[in-house]
Image: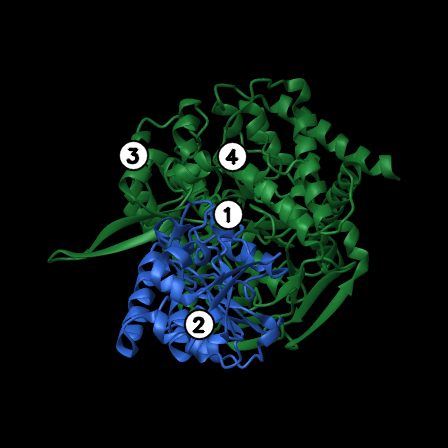
Chain colours: A blue, B green
């Protein structure tokens, strides 16, 4: 059910990259293929770095899956713990998504600051957008950046090295001994629907347009240094053949 | 165990420092919770040995739906009560049920006696018997802190501990669970103390694979949604159980000044609103409960000259405001919180502690006991001396306090004043004197608690009738055998009718009908009645203090003859339970 959208980068740059990319990148999971090199990501840092690595004449963007949540805007989980009563419903619901009744197979972890006389704290992925430590630590590509920040996990590529667990400075990557895999919040928002005291909610991430603009600016910068116009630097497909 | 055809029991022997796991298919018919705990107690009870003999046991059990459905949060403890000499059954919330579930134990049986003070560290993979000699004598709160620092698993563990009262075998010593919840009633702390068991830490990091994810999630979501849309939130989360204080007082139902009256003139500073406005600092919940009824109140204490203050926070509830407040004539929320702090620290049952002090105060006023015995003059409203008296009870300072530590029935038997020693079969009364229902309910309730059947609730119902009272109390006692097998918190009892339980059970692969659940509940109740008989209890021989019939309850003047008739009728109903089946 994947939709394919072929773009000529030169066109993008002429047309304004953001106009071409934003609607698509907002659609959750995208697959970008450039001259046979494939990158499954929607994370702008990755796209940016990827664009730098190769000389390209064409960007193919495939929409793999539509965002299930009604909004097309990327979201991330946020919390405010002052109303938390420590019921752990969020954890119990989260583990259900991995098919478990469990606290260890939950990506969200509620504990106290220091004993039950102190406030509750929430340990969960904060959806890093830049310098994503767990992603950088992952050697196998099991983690990929997700729109709105944080990562998406692909179990088929995971070798259970636990480097992501160690890498996360706030301890938000749990490890399930039973499933032998890391448990990382994918910001799906299920827990927020069950929090009885509205401590958890999904926040829209609005920086997408800004990042696209940054990519655009950078790409323009690159093209300017090498050639006055992108068209001449990167010959169009048809022209190259002829 | 969930998704299995057996009940998984961990049996720990403190004397030998050994433990075994058994998979009991035969217990599956008793659902869980009180159903399996009463069967296990039946197996291990040694009625020919003393109540606190090392061979006696403690049984903890979680229920068939524990913690994977909203408000199903409790753990039951069953034992031979050192206070009443009969059925010991107590419920606590906190994280205990969740951790037992995650450690994959349906029940934990503890027997024997450790050679020296120890604490148990229980996880899904091991049971460790750890030295607690240095903790012996420490207050409950301090023990909690030490174990928290020594044991792993923050957020996934539950810590039970006793205070000095349990060590000193005060007959109504409690067990504190996770700081704010307790196995309060009937002396579980005493039994732990007799076993030299200072604390238990349960670490639940395991899991259960869900069989039918779709069915479970649907059932869970529906019940969760229902829980959030009932009045539970408003009632129990906003002001918490103390919401009942002003209403009970207005209905002339809150036991006051050792039940000399049921209306307290000075109630204004003790209402739920007063506590919330002056002292409430946060609310918390048991694991798995979206309501969050636990209310934490803070008060400030000046402990030295030069503006030396400390802030102390404790959890407060309706029952404590009655037993340590109105019952003793205290006037402010700060005074009540300071009393709660003391019973917490010493590890005393807050209800029994307040009620025995009520008897002691009146006995002192009437000259049955003297200051040579009480060491401080006791007077209603004199909170400072009550604080000292609580310490004396916990320390069993002299003969008088040792007897007082055996309960109001024992003290009144020795010193006189049985007419105003407010207990039922040895268990001190709870905070409801609403009419025939409250006294009947506690008198015939399996453990003589207001929660056995909620008899006081029927007094307050619009359709109250003396003709149906016995039937209603009986049916409710039976239904609660079912709720306590799940083990749903009784605040959620209206949410978990039989139909809902059938649906929830079906979603985890347990096939039941409303009728089969009813039958199982009857079997469970029969087990409990059999246990009571073995422990030597005779319902019809029970003698109630005269005060119940002197002070009107909820505006009704009770008559002893009428109540005795109700008790006899109830007893007959219990008998037919046996004859019907056999």
Q: Report in which chain the residue with disc 2 lies.
A: A
Depth check, front residue: B203 or A216? A216
What chain does mark 1 sit on?
Answer: A
- Contact? badges 3 and 2 (CB < 8 Å): no
Marks 1 & 2, CB-CB < 8 Å contact: no
Give SS at disc 1: helix
Using the image, determine if residue B351 lies above or below residue A178: above
Please say whether residue B392 is visible from this viewpoint.
no
Is A214 left or right of A234, judged from the image as shown?
Answer: left
- In this figure, which residue is indicated by the disc labeled 2? A57
Closer to the eye: label 3 or 2: 2
Residue B391 falls left or right of residue B466: left
| Picture coordinates of residue B559, whole percent (x, y) | 58, 21
Specify which label sits upstream in the sequence, 4 or 3: 4
Asked whether the beta carbons under mark 4 and mark 1 sit within 8 Å of each other, the answer is no
- Please determine if labels 4 and 1 lie on a single subunit: no
Position of residue A117 measured from the top left corner of the image (x, y, whole percent): 37, 58
Residue at the disc numbered 4: B229
Pointer 1 and pointer 3: residues touching (CB < 8 Å)? no
B467 left or right, relative to B239: right
Residue occupying the point 65% across, 67% down: B111
Q: Nearer the viewer, residue B64 or B198?
A: B64
* Measured Cα–Cα span from mark 1 to mark 3: 36 Å
In front: label 2 or label 4: 2
Q: Nearer the viewer, mark 4 or mark 1?
A: 1
SS at mark 3 in the image? helix
User: Which of B540/B8 is in front?
Assistant: B8
Residue picked out by circle 3: B269
């Amino acid at each position: 059910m994947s939709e394919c959208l072929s773009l000529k980068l030169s066109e993008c740059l002429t047309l304004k990259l953001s106009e071409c990319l934003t609607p698509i990148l907002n659609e959750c999971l995208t697959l970008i293929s450039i001259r046979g090199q494939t990158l499954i990501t929607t994370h702008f840092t990755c796209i940016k770095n990827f664009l730098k690595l190769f000389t390209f004449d064409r960007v193919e963007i495939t929409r793999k899956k539509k965002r299930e949540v009604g909004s097309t805007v990327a979201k991330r989980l946020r919390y405010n713990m002052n109303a938390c009563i420590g019921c752990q419903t969020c954890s119990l619901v989260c583990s259900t998504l991995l098919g478990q009744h469990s606290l260890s197979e939950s990506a969200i972890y509620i504990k106290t600051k220091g004993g039950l006389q102190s406030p509750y704290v929430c340990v969960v992925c904060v959806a890093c957008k830049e310098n994503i430590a767990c992603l950088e630590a992952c050697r196998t590509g099991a983690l990929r950046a997700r729109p709105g920040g944080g990562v998406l996990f692909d179990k088929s590529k995971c070798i259970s090295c636990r480097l992501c667990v160690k890498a996360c400075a706030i301890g938000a990557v749990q490890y399930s001994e039973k499933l032998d895999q890391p448990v990382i919040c994918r910001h799906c928002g299920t827990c927020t629907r069950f929090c009885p005291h509205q401590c958890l909610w999904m926040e829209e991430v609005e920086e997408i347009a800004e990042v696209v603009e940054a990519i655009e600016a950078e790409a323009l910068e690159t093209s300017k240094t090498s050639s006055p116009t992108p068209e001449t630097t990167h010959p169009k497909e048809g022209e190259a053949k002829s | 165990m969930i998704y299995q055809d057996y009940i998984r029991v961990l049996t720990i022997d403190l004397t030998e420092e050994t433990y075994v796991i058994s998979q009991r298919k035969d217990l599956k018919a008793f659902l869980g919770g009180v159903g399996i705990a009463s069967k296990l107690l039946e197996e291990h009870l040694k009625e020919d040995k003393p109540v606190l003999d090392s061979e006696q046991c403690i049984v903890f059990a979680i229920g068939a739906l524990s913690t994977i459905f909203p408000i199903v949060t409790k753990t039951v403890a069953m034992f031979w009560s050192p206070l009443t000499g009969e059925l010991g059954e107590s419920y606590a919330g906190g994280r205990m049920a969740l951790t037992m579930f995650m450690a994959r134990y349906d029940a934990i049986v503890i027997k024997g006696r450790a050679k020296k003070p120890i604490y148990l560290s229980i996880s899904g993979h091991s049971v460790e018997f750890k030295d607690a000699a240095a903790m012996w004598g420490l207050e409950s709160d301090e023990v909690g802190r030490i174990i928290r620092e020594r044991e792993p698993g923050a957020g996934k563990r539950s810590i039970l501990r006793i205070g000095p009262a349990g060590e000193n075998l005060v007959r109504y010593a409690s067990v504190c669970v996770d700081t704010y919840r307790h196995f309060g009633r009937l002396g579980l702390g005493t039994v732990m103390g007799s076993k030299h068991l200072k604390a238990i830490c349960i670490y639940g990091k395991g899991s259960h694979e869900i069989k039918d994810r779709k069915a479970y999630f649907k059932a869970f979501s529906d019940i969760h949604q229902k829980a959030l849309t009932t009045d539970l939130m408003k009632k129990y989360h906003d002001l918490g159980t103390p919401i009942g204080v002003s209403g009970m007082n207005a209905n002339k139902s809150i036991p006051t000044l050792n039940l000399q009256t049921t209306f307290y003139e000075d109630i204004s500073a003790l209402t739920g609103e007063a506590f919330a406005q002056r002292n409430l600092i946060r609310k918390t919940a048991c694991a798995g409960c979206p309501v969050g009824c636990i209310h934490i109140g803070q008060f400030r204490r000046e402990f030295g000259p030069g503006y030396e203050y400390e802030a102390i926070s404790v959890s407060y509830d309706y029952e404590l405001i009655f037993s340590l407040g109105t019952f003793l004539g205290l006037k402010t929320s700060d005074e009540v919180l300071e009393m709660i702090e003391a019973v917490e620290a010493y590890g005393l049952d807050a209800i029994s502690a307040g009620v025995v002090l009520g008897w002691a105060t009146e006995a002192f006023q009437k000259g049955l006991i003297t200051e040579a015995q009480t060491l401080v003059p006791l007077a209603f409203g004199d909170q400072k001396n009550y604080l000292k008296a609580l310490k004396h009870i916990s320390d069993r300072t002299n003969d008088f306090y040792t007897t007082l530590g055996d309960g109001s029935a024992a003290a009144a038997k020795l010193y006189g004043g049985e007419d105003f020693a407010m207990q039922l079969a040895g268990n001190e009364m709870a905070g409801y004197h609403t009419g025939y229902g409250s006294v009947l309910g506690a008198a015939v309730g399996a453990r003589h608690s207001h929660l056995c059947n909620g008899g006081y609730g029927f007094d307050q119902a619009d359709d109250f009738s003396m003709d149906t009272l016995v039937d209603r109390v009986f049916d409710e006692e039976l239904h609660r055998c079912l709720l306590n097998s799940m083990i749903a918190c009784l605040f959620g009892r209206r949410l978990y009718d039989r139909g809902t339980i059938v649906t929830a059970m079906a979603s985890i692969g347990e096939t039941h009908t409303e009728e089969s659940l009813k039958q199982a509940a009857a079997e469970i109740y029969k087990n409990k009645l059999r246990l009571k008989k073995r422990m030597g209890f005779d319902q019809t021989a029970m003698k109630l203090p005269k005060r119940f019939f002197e002070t009107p309850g909820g505006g009704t003047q009770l008559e002893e003859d009428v109540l005795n008739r109700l008790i006899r009728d109830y007893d007959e109903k219990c008998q037919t339970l046996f004859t019907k089946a056999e």
